Image (spheres, grey):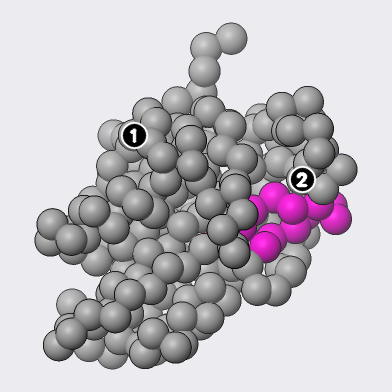
Amino acid sequence: MARDRLQGDRLRAGLSSVKIGREVVVLEETGSTNDVVREMAEKGSSEGLVVLAEHQTAGRGQRGKRWESSPHKGLWLSILLRPAIPVGESARLTSWAARAVASTIEKSCNLKATIKLPNDIYVTGRKVAGVLVEMRAQPQVDHLAILGVGLNVNQAPEEFPEELRDQATSLAIATGRLQDRTELAIALLQNLDRSYRGAIGCSRPR
């Protein structure tokens, strides 16, 4: 069966009127999408940039833990944000993002999703997603924040490393059917975009 590939044109069309998703880059493979976004931010990219990868070779989670990023099976993405909040309040971003991921899963897949603080999302008692916020102070301007999201979408049980099979799951396993990753990415990014300003309390015009 042909691999399910993220469709960049569909993503851009579905996100044409948003701030988060105003620029979308889809990579076949990279070390970490967070690192790619950081490099692009340093070159002047605007808030709302989204980088997705079909495969990450060095995806990471909280406390430096490795995140397994199976090729063409999940959503591995990072978003450039410039929130008007102190660096010490980055936990607000983590909480907002985790809620947005959980609510997207519930609405798109009709699953009950729960959040295990501070940054993990569970369905059917197993981890299906995680978020990671890396924030950096910037002089004279809003600070730089990079939101990374890892969401297991279409993995079969045997596609997880053996040591994770009793802890991790995917949306396909939980629902019993494969999911359209591009459609799910659009729904997630639209949800993040709708909720961002209100959740973070950013009032400065963009």
Magenta segment: does it hold 126? yes
Number of marks present in the image shown: 2
Look at the image and tell me in which quarter the C terminus lies: bottom left
Quadrant position of residue 102: bottom right
User: With respect to residue 16, does 10 lie above or below?
Assistant: above
What residue would you read off at disc 2?
A: 168
Q: Residue at x 65, y 33 (%)?
A: 154
Q: In this view, does 6 lie to the left or right of 104?
A: left
**Crowd tier of the residue under label 2, counting other residues whose Cα lies within 10 Å: few below 14, some 14–19, many 20 or above:** some
Label 2 amino acid? Ala
Q: Where is residue 12 in the image (x, y as percent from the top left)?
A: 28, 43
Look at the image and tell me in which quarter the N terminus lies: top right
Asked whether residue 3 is in view, the answer is yes
Q: Where is residue 70 in the image (x, y as percent from the top left)?
A: 58, 32
Q: What element carries label 1?
A: strand
Label 1 amino acid? Leu
Q: Which residue is drawn at 51% across and 23% down?
A: 4
Kindly give the residue lying farthest to the top in the view shown: 1
What residue would you read off at disc 1?
A: 27
Between 154 and 161, the one lying in front of the other is: 161
Q: Where is residue 18 in the image (x, y as percent from the top left)?
A: 29, 61
Q: In this view, does 149 lie to the left or right of 143?
A: right
Between 206 and 43, the one lying in front of the other is: 43
Q: In this view, does 158 lie to the left or right of 106?
A: right
**Crowd tier of the residue under label 1, counting other residues whose Cα lies within 10 Å: few below 14, some 14–19, many 20 or above:** some
Magenta segment: does it hold 191? no
Q: Which residue is drawn at 24% across and 53% down?
A: 39
Between 36 and 150, the one lying in front of the other is: 36
Magenta part of the chain: 120-131
